[in-house]
Structures are given as C-alpha cells and as structure tokens.
Image (cartoon, grey):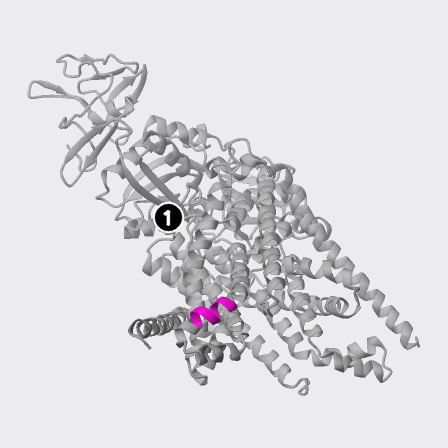
Amino acid sequence: MLTKNSQQNLVWSILWIITSLLMLVLILLIGFVFVKGAPEMKLSFIFGATTNGGLMTPIVGTLYLTIMTLIFLIPLSVGTALYLSEYAKQNWFTEFIRYSLSSLAGIPSIIFGLFGVALFVMIWFKKASIIAGSFTLTCLALPFMVATTEEAIRSIPKAWREASYGLGATKWYTIIHVVLPNATPGILTGVIMSIGRVIAETAPLLATAGFSAFLPVSPLDGTRTLALHLFYLATEAPTVGGLTRNDLLSQAMAVGTVLILLIILLNFLARMIFNHFNQKVRGFR
Amino acid sequence: MSKPEQFSEKLGKNLIFIFASISLLILLSIVFFIFRDGFLAFKENGFFHFIFGNDWSVQDNTFSILPLIVGSLVVTLGALIISVPIGFSCAVFLAEIAPEKVRNIVKPAIDILVGIPSVVFGLLGMILLVPYIRNHYGGPGLSILTAIIVLILMILPTIIAQAEDSIRSVPSSYKNASLALGATHLQTIWNVILPCAKSGLVSSVILSSGRAIGEAMAVYMVIGNTFTFPKSLLDPSRTLTSNIVGQIEEATVGGAHLHALFGCGLILLFIVFILNSYSFFIKRRGCRSC
Amino acid sequence: MFKRNKILSVIVGIVAILGIASVMVPSNALTATAKTTIELWLNKPQARVNGETRWIDDTNHSVTPISKWGRTMLPVKFISDNFGLITTWDGKESKVTVMQGGELAGTISESGSTSVLPLAEKFALAFMKKNPKVRISYTGGGTGAGIKQAAAGTVDIGAASRDLKITESDLMVHAIARDGVAIIVNKGIGISGLTVEQVGKIYAGQISDWKDVGGRSGKINVYTREEGSGTRDTFQTFCLDPFALKMSPACLAKKSNGEIQMSVQSDPNGIGYVSFGYAEGVKELLLNGKEPSIANVKNGSYPISRRLYFLTKHNNNVLVQAFIDFCRSDEGQKIVLQEGYIQLAD
C-alpha cells in the first residue's frame, strides 16, 4: 500500500494530466475553427452583402435584434428586481415569484422558441420578425437578468438607504439616486452576459426571427443572426456560383470565429467591470 | 413631500409595479402555453399512446415519442456519467492544486468556453467527429456516441466552472483545521472540502444536466434524427429537442403538429423537473453544518 | 374569352410602349420597329420574337390576335413582356396598366420553401434593381408554412415546391420554374443507375445493402428530409406511393437540400434526394435509365420532376402581380437557368 504522500502524488499527477488533456482538446478545437475559417476572414466576406455571400445582414440583424431585446429586457428586469427587493412585502408571494423565475432559468432555450412561435409569431405579429424574435429572447434572458439585478440591488448596504431617508429623500428619489447608480456595475455585468447569451442562441430564433437575406429595416422584417447564418452555411446553403461545400464550411467556420471573438470580447468587458467595482456577481453558468 | 415629488413617487411606484406584473404575466403565459398545447397533444393522441407509442407521422396525423424520450435520456445520462467525474477532477485541480499562474489562465478560458454558441460545437462535431466515427467505428457516423461526445465537450466547462466556485467557497477554516489535525491535502479534499461543497457541486450537476438534455442545435447536427430506438452506441437516434429543431419551421402553421411538438417540450420539462427534484433531495441530505 | 386572371386583348390606358412604332395595322402580319422584333398573325396562337417561335400564352393555346370593330386587336401582355415592360391586371377594377420599370413602389413579403429560396432571392434582387422603390423580403419556413401563410394573407407570396393538395386549392397558383429531383449517391459508390422501384424500396427499408442493387457490400445510409418538405412530398409521390411503400423511420432526417448533399458527399454509403440545383460534389443516378438532366425533365422522360410555385390570394395587388410576371418573363427565366433550375417554357 502506498504511503499517504505517494497516494497524494499519484492523484495529483492524474489530475494534472486530465486537466491538461482536456484543456488541450478544447483549445485545439477552437484553434481548428480559427484555422479553417481563416481563408474566409476577408473584409469583403465580412462586410459584403449577404445576397452575395457576405455577412452584412447577419451582423446588422444581430445588432438590431440584440438592441431591441435589451430595450425590453432592461426596464422589465430592473423594474421586477426593484419591486421584489424594495416594494413588495417579503412574503410567500415574492418567494414564489423568485422560485418561478429561477425554475424558468432552467428551461431549455428551444422551448422558448416554441413559446415564441405560438404566441408572438402565430398570434401577435403574424410573421416571424425581428420583434417576435426579440420578445422571445427577452423571455429567455429575463430570469437571469432579474436575479442578477436583484443581487446587485441587495448588495447595497441598507445603511445607505437609511441615510438617504434620514436626509428626507423619498423612496423613489432614493432608488434613482442611491440604489440604481450603485447597482449599475452589477446590472451592467448582467447586461453584458445576457448579450453574450443572446448572441449565442440559435434554437429560439429558428422560427421566430425570420430568415431574410436582405438588410432589415422595420422591426416586422425577418432577419438572421450570426449564429443562424452559421447554421445556414453549414447545412442549407446552396452550392451555386462555383462554391463548393468545402468553401461553405470554411465560411461557416469564419462566422464561428467571429462569434468566438465576440464572446471573448464580452467576457473580457464583463471581467473588467467586475474587477473594477469588485461586486460579487453570481454567474449563471 | 411637495406635489411634483409626490407625483414622481407615485409614477415610479406604478411603473415598477407594471414592469413586475408584465414579468409575472410572461412567466404565467409561458407555463400556460406549454401546458395547454402539450395537453392538447395528449388529448389528440391519447396520453399513453403519445408517450409510449412509436410512430410519428405528420401526414398520418399521428404522433408518439417513446424513441425520442429514450434518445434524450441515453444521450444525457451518457454525457453526465463521463463529464461529472472529469469535471469534478478538473475543478478540484483548479481550486486546490493548480498554482496561481495556471489558474489565472485556465479559469478565464473555461468561462469563455461556457459561452461559445452551441452551433459551433455542432459544426465541429459534424465536420470532425462524424467522419471519424464513421471511418473508424462503422455506422453512419451520426449516432448516439457522437452526440454524447459533443455534449461532454459542451457541459464540461459548465461543470468545471460551477464546481470550482463551490469548492473555493468552502470556508478555509475547515481546510486549515483538517490539515492541522494531520490530514494530507488529498485526505482533506476528499473528506472535508468535497462534502461541504456538496450543495454547490450538486447544483453544478443539475445545471449541466439541464443544459445537456435541453441542447438542441448541436445534438441535431450529429445524431442522425431517425425515429428508431438505438440498439448500440453507433446507431443514430433522435431526441426530444432535436425533434423540435427539425420540425418547428414546418409546424408554424399550428394544429396537431405544433401541439405534438409542445408535447415533446412538456415531457422534456417533466424530465428536467425530475432531475432537479432528485438533486434537491441530495442537497437536503448533505452537510447541514456548512 | 376574357379570363379573369389573364391580361389579354383589352387595350385600355396604355401609358407608354417603348419601341413600338405602330401596332394598329390592318394587315395580316405585324411587325414593330425596335431592337426586339415581334411578329404576330391574325388568328394564329404562335408568334415570333426575334425569329424564335413561341406561344402567345403557353397555358392557353387559343389566345390569338383577332380582328374586331374593324381593328386588329393584339394581346398586350405578350407584347409588353417581350419588350421588357410591366403589364398588370387589377381584377377589382378590370384595369390594365402598362408601365416601364422603376415606377413601382411598395413592399412584398414572401415565405415558404427552402428549395425555392435561392431562386426567390435572385428574383427579388433583380426586380429590386429594376424597381428601386420596391422592397422584397423572403423568409424560409418550408413549403407548408408558405402555403398556410399565403392563404392567411400574412405574406403576399407563398413559395411551394410541390403541387397543392385539394384542401389547399383556394390560392392562385403561379408556376415560376420547373425542377427535377435527383437521386444522389457518393462518388465512389460504383453504381450508375437504379429503377424508381429500387429507390423506393431502399427508402422503405426493404433493400438495405448496396450489394443488393449491384454495388459493393455496405449498409446503405439513407438520407431523407423532414416531413413537411415539398421535396420530400415530391419524392414520395414518385418513388414510394406508386409501389404502396412507406418511408422507413430509420432514414436519417435532414432539414434541407444542402444538408443532404453534404451528407452524401462525405458518406461513402450514403444515398439522398435533392433538387437539381443542389447536386454538386456527388454522383447523380440514372433513374429508370434516364439521366437527371434539364432536357430529360423537359421531355418528360426523367421520372421525378415538379414545378415550383408562387402562391397568392386571388385578389393580389398590382405590385405582386408585376413581380410574378417578372419572374415568369424572359428575364426572370434567365435567372432560373442561372440558378440551376429549369425554365418553364420548352
């Protein structure tokens, strides 16, 4: 029987090996995406019109969709979080809402897609469109944003609020001038992480955001996101105009590269804000 | 309070209340739609037939999902069985053993990997894994095995990140006490730290199992999407989620087809709920004093 | 004689006809002085455009120039189409409008078949170039979705890659191209053709090894489309239904033509069916000895062919009709050829 120390050394070695191997595999995979996509990472591809095989429409579509989602998401989640933490009596009802929201967070994203089709596409807007897609994504991101915002709000010491009341400020004034400004870093981090999630989502948008190749103008237009376009290039795209399947796969990899770079950027931003303000943020990984 | 202050006070309060109510409405309507359309599927196809039957045909208007349930369960459990041990090992490594420099590189990398879109993993699976399995192991390459491997790659970062967080959040006093009593680092980890991190570890498993069973795009691209029961790991199959991905666009016209897809979703939620509750019980029985 | 939905023989409100010096000539043969030359004869259903003979209306062979009220009356649509103008018919007001391009304005929304998608996009691009004030948007969704949305009026045009069923017949059907469905296999498979029945049996699961159809030994990996696909329906109509066969649930389902092409290209044992335009990088099988070629679809000898349709409601508006007419015109049909589909006219 090995001594305690050699046991430990053995286990340590195994763990080193497992972790290194795992990291190696994952890095290699990401590297493969970059390498295979490299031939297509030309400016003419990225900024070309999509009807010519470029990425302009997915880029604009992703921006349009994300911004529209945030427009709905931020007020809703901040409002709900404020209600739960500032206004509502802490009773079974608020606990129930919190529990429901956290359960909602566990629902697979494709189900939000189904819901979005049934409500936004079939009943409200009658067609798959940017606005239907952004409503769907708002529902998807809502639980996480509410939780993050509430956490950020709660982390503001009660004393600060008391001080504000003590100086004669109203509740609303306190919220606007004391609570929200100090919760902003936490909320911002949550927003950035939600953006990351929204960009990476494909399933909920398949049937709710439409699929037009033309640049979107009105919110009732259909459009594509980068993730949807990746799926399209990898599967449906026709091999016309001299393109081979291999070319299309390289293009798909290039889109993947763009997406991965975006994720890295967003992560970096979130990390910077996190570190700068040193707030404790629960990741929803 | 002066008049304008009173006004803005009231306005603010009402605004907040409205937003909160909208959120609640959203919650309720999601539940409403899923249950209503899901139950319509049960009604149109017969509850037992829907769940335990084995034919799905849009033109014959008959839907049943047993192969899908089996596919989802096999793929999820297969991925979990491999990912959990490996994930926990890496988490322990990162939290306790790795030098600071290593940790500062690996942890951010893991965070990034968590956020990578599922289509990228699906694409990699399609291009690299499917031909490899087809050429070296036989079968069409699109199979349960391929799906399991892709899922493992996707949920490992999630498990590692969450587990590492919970291990780090165990109070260092416990660790110090154990070491002071003469235990080795390894013994401390195994007997003190891990049991105390139990609740966090269990939530990491729940979260990843939710992600594994709910993964739609990547699985769709590598699993073959047949309506048959897989008899071996190399057989293709179909999951509840990949079924929805495959058919949702044709079903936007509504009717029994859409209801059947909602039925898939409802069963999926049911499975997720069971998984969550099971882990909830494990948490309860864990270390109370931590 | 005057079909409700055909623009014929009523010369009312002619705004401008480019390149025609004179049309009203009381004689048997009429020509126009323009870069394009159109020759028509009284009471003859065929005319000559730049020397090429064609039907004035290829779905109705009795449309001819006629003599009435002491005048020779000509079919406006045929002439304007061939001069590159846009002629539209408003059923509500029984009004014919002839315009040069560039005057149309508005939006058109389309949705439907993914087989038609590449073609529809190119149509839209070309039309929008000619008419800069028009915006067209195309969403996918599949043939089924396109039909339903067109019927519900939520889109102006629904694109379908199969014939309508009886239950769906309340729509106006405009054929815009023809297409064939090719049976594709991996390039290394070693077989050059199969019978339609063999293909059906493979898809029904009754033939499972390549050696049973003349190839080397190997389990056949059968790729099909998800239900609701117009291409799948077409395949079923020609390869399964005639032999009372049903698609086996063990077929590997894919969502689009492109996926099937890619799967077959990389799978040495794969077989699949795709629209003609997607058969690249793979081997196309002879069916019943016939090559999957444009000529064979036109002469009807290739077994699996279909039309691609734009569907609208019956009271569609001027803009939509102009677009559809454009797609069916020479210019539009040129695009059809470029995209790998088959033109409507012979």
Quadrant where the N terminus of chain B sits is bottom left
Tag 1: residue type? Asp
**Which image quadrant is residue C312 in?**
top left
Q: Quadrant of residue B29?
A: bottom left
Q: Position of residue C166 (x, y in %)?
A: 30, 50
Residue A176 percent across, percent down from the top left: 43, 69
Q: Main secondary structure of the magenta part?
A: helix
Q: Which residue is mark 1?
A: A221
- Name the one closer to the observer, B206 or C52: B206
Residue at the far front: name it. A167
Mark 1 element type: loop
Q: What range of the chain is rendered magenta?
A: A175-183
Q: Residue at x 59, y 80 (%)?
A: B280
Point 57% across, 53% down: residue: B119
Which is nearer the eye, C134 or B95? B95
The answer to if A191 sits in the magenta stretch is no
In the image, residue A237 sits, relative to residue B205, either above or below, namely: above
- Above or below — where is A98 with respect to C22? below
Q: Is residue A177 magenta?
A: yes
Percent across and percent down for residue A47 are 51, 38
Q: Quadrant of the C terminus of chain B?
A: bottom right
**Could you tell me which residue is drawn at 54 percent across and 72 percent down?**
B272
Residue C124 at what x, y percent from top left? 37, 36
Is residue A114 visible in this depiction of the protein? no
Q: Chain of mark 1?
A: A
